[in-house]
Amino acid sequence: MHTIGQGKVNARTANLLGALTLEATHLQQQAGEEVVGIGGAAAAALVTIQARPGWTIEQMRGGLGLTQPGAARLVERLTREGLVERFGPGGRRGYELRLTAKGDTVLEQLLLGRRAALTDLLAPLSDPDQARLGELLELLLAGRIGDRGDLERVCRLCERRCCAQCPVSDAYERHQND
């Protein structure tokens, strides 16, 4: 066992968490690919563009963990699919991005599919167990936030309307005020 933060980390707990996060990741990717039809970071790009309309490819790519050429190729694919549009003068600053009406519809379907997959994953837990898990997840997520890039990375697939008060954003704000 390691002593980290306030408690001891049990190797078995860490291992179980790793297995569960892989399963949750798989379910989210599967739901995204079924709806969007494009693998990789497409789903996260749609969520980010909706949350930050007017951002450029350069502003968006960091939270997605993409290189500039990779992000440009992704935006090109999303544009060809009619999900994203570029506007503004372009040039050195780059085009600003926003979702099209079709993009908004696809994103809504994506988020509903993601929610259904994750809800199914949580189904074995009772309501009180789910509430406690939610509290623990808030603590774990808040502990991962240091800067704006962390905020964008962690929330890149969030269904933002589900969190009346975002624990990740709150942690970022607290970090900024420290």
Image (cartoon, grey):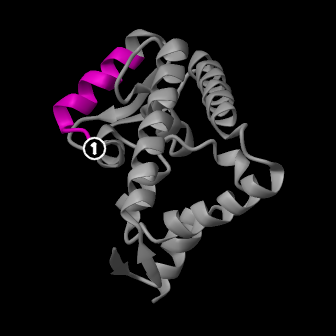
Q: Which residues are drawn in magenta?
A: 66-78
Q: Image height check: is 37 above or below 105?
A: above
Q: Quadrant of residue 13?
A: bottom left
Q: Residue furthest bottom?
A: 178
The foreground one among 127 and 35 is 127
Q: Amino acid at mark 1?
A: Gly
Q: Is 155 located above or below residue 72 in the figure?
A: below
Residue 15, image x, y percentages: 38, 52
Relative horizontal placement of residue 130, taking residue 95 as reference (left or right): right
Can you see residue 54? no
Query: Within 10 Å of the Cα at label 1, are there few (<14), some (14-19), or many (20+) other Cα atoms?
Result: few
Q: In the rendered image, which quarter is residue 105 located in? A: top right
Given residues 177 and 142, the one toward you in this image is: 142
Image coordinates for residue 4, horizontal then vertical, percent: 37, 80
Image coordinates for residue 161, horizontal then vertical, percent: 71, 46
Residue tagged 1? 65
Residue at image point 62% right, 28% down: 117
Q: Using the rendered image of the protein, determine whether residue 133 is visible from the camera's viewpoint.
A: yes
Q: Quadrant of the N terminus?
A: bottom left
**Looking at the picture, does residue 149 appear above or below residue 61?**
below
Residue at x-position 28% and y-position 43%: 65
Q: Could you say whether the residue bearing mark 1 is in a helix, strand or loop? A: loop
